[in-house]
Image: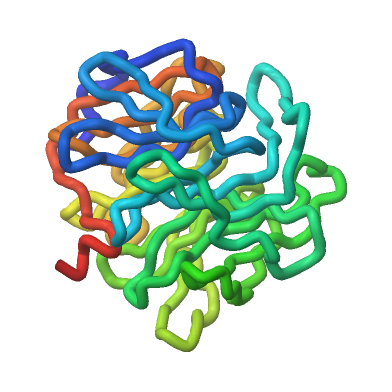
Amino acid sequence: MSPLEQGWRPHLLAQGLEFPEGPIAMPDGSIVFTQIRGQCLSRYRAGEITTLANTGGGANGATLGPDGAFYVANNGGISVGPHGGWSAESQIPGRIQRVSPDGQLSDVAVALPGEPPNRPNDLCFGPDGLLYFTDPHNWEDLANLKPGRVNRTTLDGEVELLAQVDRFPNGIGFGPDDRLYVAESVTQKVWVYDWTTTGLGEARLFCTLPKGYPDGFCFSDVGDLIVCGSLGDTIWVFDSDGKERQCLETPPGTEPTNCCIADGRLVVTLSGVGQLVALDYPDGPLPLYPDRLR
């Protein structure tokens, strides 16, 4: 039986959200996530939403660090969805931010490589303890889209350019094979890179979404890749060889943008309708770094 063969039967966790993204499954059962248009990092727990920090700009991807703090890819203050675009009243240069356990906000990296604008989108920790993140550059101007970047940074803000991705690098994560996976939204492809401490190898094609545009993704503990196909209203499951296992279609305009596995459920951000939902899921999550080292 495919993991999502029961079809679209979501449990509604929260609604009225302002372009939710970047969900993180926490040990206490809560879900921490960003709200791009809400310009904040939020927590869902037992039916309630609380604000952990007001980030300004546009809080996009998020991940949990080894110090218990949250790290946020802030795109500066933009979003685009089925219901139109949004720009923050006061945009900021894109950056990587840190939110301490008590909600204190600070900058990790502001001086990013490449021609501005820098639009950090998603991020993850790697086996070396560094933060890896995508920067799709000027994706708000698709007619004149320029190549984006894959970078990594120390927690002291020393940023290194690792790779160029031509057509909107988006979701990013280390798979069970310790290779780095990067979604390229406009081409509908997910690429994989061999990784060493010195950098990345050549990009190799892992899979192509037949429908939808790959956005955020997560891995299960059996090696499957679960990819949100935003704007195409799809969620895809691929096995460890990149073979399609299943496509789950979501209602029109819901725009699934990112996901994580938590407590027997696949938690999904539906940015188009401002919802956080969960679907029953039989497999557990692949531990993320730094927890994978424990």
The quadrant in which the N terminus is found is top left
Residue 172 locus on image (x, y percent): 47, 57
The quadrant in which the C terminus is found is bottom left
Residue 121 locus on image (x, y percent): 58, 49
Residue plotted at (53% across, 51% down): 106
65 vs 271, nearest the viewer: 65
Q: Is residue 184 visible?
A: no
In the rendered view, does 60 fall on the left or right side of 177? right
User: Outermost residue, bottom direction?
Assistant: 198
* In the rendered image, the vertical position of residue 118 relative to residue 7, given as above or below: below
In the rendered view, does 235 fall on the left or right side of 10? right
Residue plotted at (48% across, 18% down): 17
User: Outermost residue, right direction?
Assistant: 144
Residue 143 locus on image (x, y percent): 85, 44
125 vs 43, nearest the viewer: 43
Q: Quadrant of residue 147?
A: bottom right
Residue plotted at (42% across, 12% down): 15
Colour pattern of the rendering: rainbow
